[in-house]
Amino acid sequence: MPRPFSSTFLRFSLLRKIRKQLLVVLTVVVAVAWPQISAQTLKPGTDDPGSTSQPASAGADTQAAQPATTVAAPGLVHIVPFGRNGNKGLTKTAIPIPAGSTLKYWGGPVISQIHVVAVFWGPNVNTAITGPGAIDQFFTDITNSRYYDLLTEYSTTGVTGVGTPVASSNQPINRGGFDSKVTITPVLCATASAASPCSLTDSDVQRELTRQITASVVPQPVFDTQGNANTFYMIYFPPGVNITVGTDKSCVTLCAYHSNTDTPFSPRFIPYGVLPDFAPPSACSSGCGTGTLFDNVTAVTSHEMAEAVTDALVGSATTNGPPLAWYDMDLIPGTNVQLAEIGDMCNGSDGTVTAGGHTYTVQQEFSNLQGQCVLAPPNFDITLPPAVPPASSFNLTLSIDGFFGSVPITFQYLGT
């Protein structure tokens, strides 16, 4: 006499059998639970928000061809614009995102398992950042959090880019960690202060970072099995250092930016971020958030970290193709500014998360899956009966707990 199936067996064998049904159900649930993305047609295996996060389920993902728009500028560097409002209300975003907007994958690399190195430009960086349990603890906690997990939907495994040439880095995105914090002695602006200001260009920053890596003052970059850099160097500056990148200036038009070295370390270019001093009398103290100094620093840092993970080599992008990774070419309504990267679409929309037992202010990031600026991926929970006889039908409840609350849905499995 056949014995009943256990729920443990069902969780593995049943989900394999009803994979397509689950994807269809998820399509319906997303359209109901998140009406903001109802203008999109969600079809597993095509250019849908969910398929990029579930390549194993949906198969190799080929996105629809895109119009031949042009990247904003050669050697694109993305900034956090000065004047972000730091709004902690989660009901809407600071940027008016058109319905149906998605980040498209252009074929470039992501950071598959981040190794963060915090670099302090000389001895005068604010102790609110350099002290024990400050930015070091933030990176330790946040790179192993639900907040960081939302980036995993931008894994490129099985995803074919829409750029020219057609390419894919074929990388997962997994949780990472904090490697170390290092105070360097730079050639320029080593002892800068509010009373003794000093100016740098992005080229100066790159040369100094390269020099410090070559001299092994900071840890050598770590590379994944694809040969792409996993190390992200986040550089914090003391009072009085004014940084110019292109036509943008720190605490005038930008709060921070991320880019990559323009010369490669074997075998690839290295991503980095730049954050000027945020303490008074710096204009960034009021123009880069409305929270405490540390809250503003972590919010802007999270913006740049998320963008570096999902668009690691944007600084070398000159065409609509690799090394550009996840990017939206569409314009913000009423402007000639592109929606751009995962953090740009949500600039100024901050919230709080708990990670590692600590509470941090971070910026929301855009989720293709949820069609919104969010602080975490949705929770998916499947409830099965404890035991089911062979060839019997039963009810299965799928609960999705995300940005807009918990949405349960029950459907019946009728057997093979």
Image: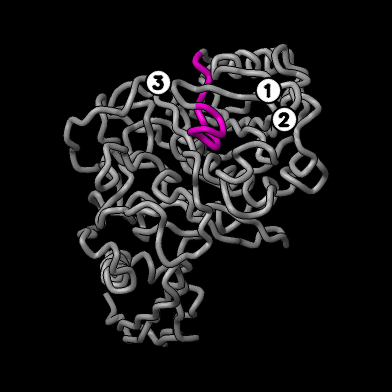
**Amino acid type, residue under disc 3 in the picture:** Gly
Q: Is residue 245 left or right of residue 326?
A: right
How is the rendered protein coloured? one colour
Disc 2 target residue? 238
Compared to residue 22, the image places residue 193 above or below, namely: above
Residue at image location 65% in from the left, 15% down from the top: 208
Quarter of the image where the C terminus is located:
bottom left
Q: Earlier in the sequence, mark 2 or mark 3?
A: 3
**Amino acid type, residue under disc 2 in the picture:** Pro
In space, the residues marked 2 and 1 are separated at their CA atoms by 24 Å
Q: Quadrant of residue 331?
A: top left
The location of residue 239, given as percent across then percent down, is 71, 30
Could you say which disc has been placed on residue 220 in the image? 1
Could you say which disc has been placed on residue 75 in the image? 3
Specify start and end residues of the magenta stretch as a single range.
249-262
Q: Earlier in the sequence, mark 2 or mark 1?
A: 1
Q: Residues within 10 Å of mark 3 (few under 14, many from 20)?
A: some
In space, the residues marked 1 and 3 are separated at their CA atoms by 24 Å
The location of residue 375, given as percent across then percent down, is 51, 59
Report helix, strand or loop for mark 3.
loop
Identify which residue, 97 or 231, lies in the foreground: 97
Residue at image location 36% in from the left, 64% down from the top: 16
Q: Quadrant of residue 215?
A: top right
Compared to residue 330, the image places residue 412 above or below, namely: below
Residue at image location 35% in from the left, 33% down from the top: 168
